[in-house]
């Protein structure tokens, strides 16, 4: 029999154990939230038109990659644009440890595609079309299917929706594969029955496009924080869907009402990096870093994950929204009020670089809480410096003397 440890030895062992446990919690990339969910999802949609960006994306910050979109043709075959590049995309996703889903249907379904869907979902054609989906899934080693049948298609297919979802679920689950859906914030079409909702492993709630450029006379935020609260209430209270089956959808794009067009977040911060810390400029509305952090905290507390439409719109630098999401997740179990944005101070003058933010509970080494430096490579240039006539903005007042 081994000697029993003394009380002092026991306390040391306990302290080390607690410290190790705490460090493990802080280092988890996709942590549990206060409801002890261990499978927090970070779902990123990638459209086939953005496949060329795959090497610029930090896939390690995702748990799921949803490839968009596939649809039936006139003969009932499942077709996907850029199919030749799909094996490479799937391989890179799997190498990063992600689950890869194929998203079918999508928004903007025209009359021709709607007619194809109406045909393949008829009882006599449904099983064959599901066979097409399963064959595609197996061919490309996909992990599941995302059913993105939205309002513009639902009125066409009506009561055909639920039988399709249930049969597809059974076929996918029989192979150990998953099924998800992308649906609205509230007020679902009557075709989306409770039975169909229960069939999904999880649901991506599209908490954006509350308004948009299709209403140019009514400019305003299309994805405010309050909209996320509306979604949470509707799905958990009215539709009785467990919160852990819901992901909170966030946009990596905005609506430019002046020019009546959508605009990627990446292009917004290219106009002015300062726009990363706000949600609008002129008549363009979007989610900046502070709102994205706040929504991520809400997702941690009240949803089972966060979903992004679409990751190709992100900035590929330190102003990345995906980076801000990931840092917020990694900061758990930091209390909501303790999480702050810090800024790199590489020249050590006490003033931070607004283009290099970091979300954390405490300032990391060489980071400060302000973003007032206009040149973080020269400690002689900062807001307290004396302006001299040298062709530089020494005191960061925006004037070169």
Image (cartoon, helix red, strand yellow):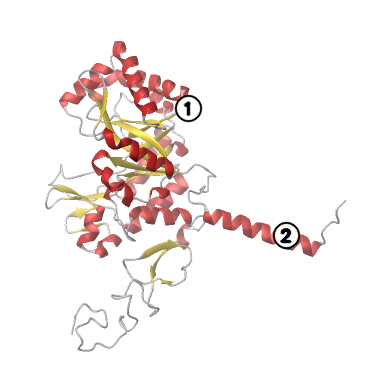
Identity of the residue furthest to the right in this view: 1
Residue 147 lies in quadrant: top left
In what quadrant of the picture does the C terminus appear? bottom left
Q: Which mark is residue 28?
A: none
- Viewed as shown, does residue 18 lie left or right of 45? right
- Helix, strand or loop at label 1? It is loop
Residue 356 in the image: above or below residue 79? below
- Viewed as shown, does residue 282 lie left or right of 296? left
Q: Residue at position x 47%, y 22% from top?
A: 174
Q: Residue at position x 48%, y 63% from top?
A: 361
Q: CA distance from mark 1 to mark 2?
A: 43 Å
- Viewed as shown, does residue 120 lie left or right of 214? right
Instruction: Give the residue at mark 1.
Output: 176
Q: Position of residue 167 (x, y in %)?
A: 39, 19
Q: Position of residue 348 (x, y in %)?
A: 40, 78
Taking depth in this image into account, of 161 and 356 the one nearest to the observer is 356
Q: Badge 2: few (under 14), some or many (20 or more) residues near its Cα, within 10 Å?
A: few
- Viewed as shown, does residue 143 lie left or right of 148? right
Instruction: Give the residue at mark 2.
Output: 13
- Helix, strand or loop at label 2? It is helix
Q: Is residue 108 visible?
A: yes
């Amino acid at each position: 029999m081994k000697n029993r440890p003394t009380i002092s030895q026991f306390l040391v062992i306990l302290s080390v154990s607690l410290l190790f446990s705490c460090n493990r919690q802080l280092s988890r990339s996709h942590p549990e939230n206060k409801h002890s969910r261990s499978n927090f999802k970070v779902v990123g949609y990638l459209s086939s038109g953005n496949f060329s960006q795959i090497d610029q994306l930090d896939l390690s910050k995702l748990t799921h990659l949803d490839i968009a979109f596939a649809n039936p043709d006139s003969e009932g075959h499942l077709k996907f644009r850029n199919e030749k590049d799909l094996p490479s995309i799937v391989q890179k996703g799997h190498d990063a440890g992600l689950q890869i889903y194929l998203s079918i249907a999508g928004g903007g379904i025209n009359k021709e595609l709607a007619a194809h869907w109406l045909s393949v979902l008829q009882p006599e054609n449904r099983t064959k079309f599901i066979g097409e989906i399963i064959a595609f899934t197996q061919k490309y080693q996909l992990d599941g299917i995302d059913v993105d049948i939205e309002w513009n298609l639902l009125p066409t297919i009506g009561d055909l929706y639920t039988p399709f979802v249930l049969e597809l679920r059974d076929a996918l689950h029989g192979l150990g594969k998953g099924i998800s859906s992308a649906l609205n914030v509230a007020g679902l079409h009557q075709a989306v029955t409770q039975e169909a909702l229960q069939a999904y492993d999880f649901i991506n709630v599209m908490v954006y496009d509350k308004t948009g450029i299709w209403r140019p006379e009514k400019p305003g935020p299309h994805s405010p924080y309050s909209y996320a609260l509306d979604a949470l209430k509707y799905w958990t209270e009215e539709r009785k869907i467990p919160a852990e089956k819901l992901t909170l959808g966030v946009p990596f794009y905005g609506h430019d009402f002046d020019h009546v067009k959508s605009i990627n977040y990446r292009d917004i911060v290219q106009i002015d990096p300062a726009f990363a810390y706000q949600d609008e400029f002129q008549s363009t509305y979007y989610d900046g870093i502070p709102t994205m952090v706040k929504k991520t905290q809400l997702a941690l507390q009240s949803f089972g994950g966060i979903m992004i439409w679409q990751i190709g719109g992100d900035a590929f630098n330190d102003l990345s929204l995906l980076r801000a999401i990931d840092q917020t997740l990694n900061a758990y179990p930091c209390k909501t009020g303790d999480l702050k944005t810090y800024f790199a101070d590489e020249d050590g003058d006490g003033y931070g670089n607004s283009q290099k933010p970091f979300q954390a509970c405490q300032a990391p080494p060489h980071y400060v809480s302000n973003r007032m430096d206009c040149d973080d490579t020269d400690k002689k240039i900062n807001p307290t410096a004396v302006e001299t006539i040298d062709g530089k903005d020494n005191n960061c007042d925006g004037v070169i003397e």
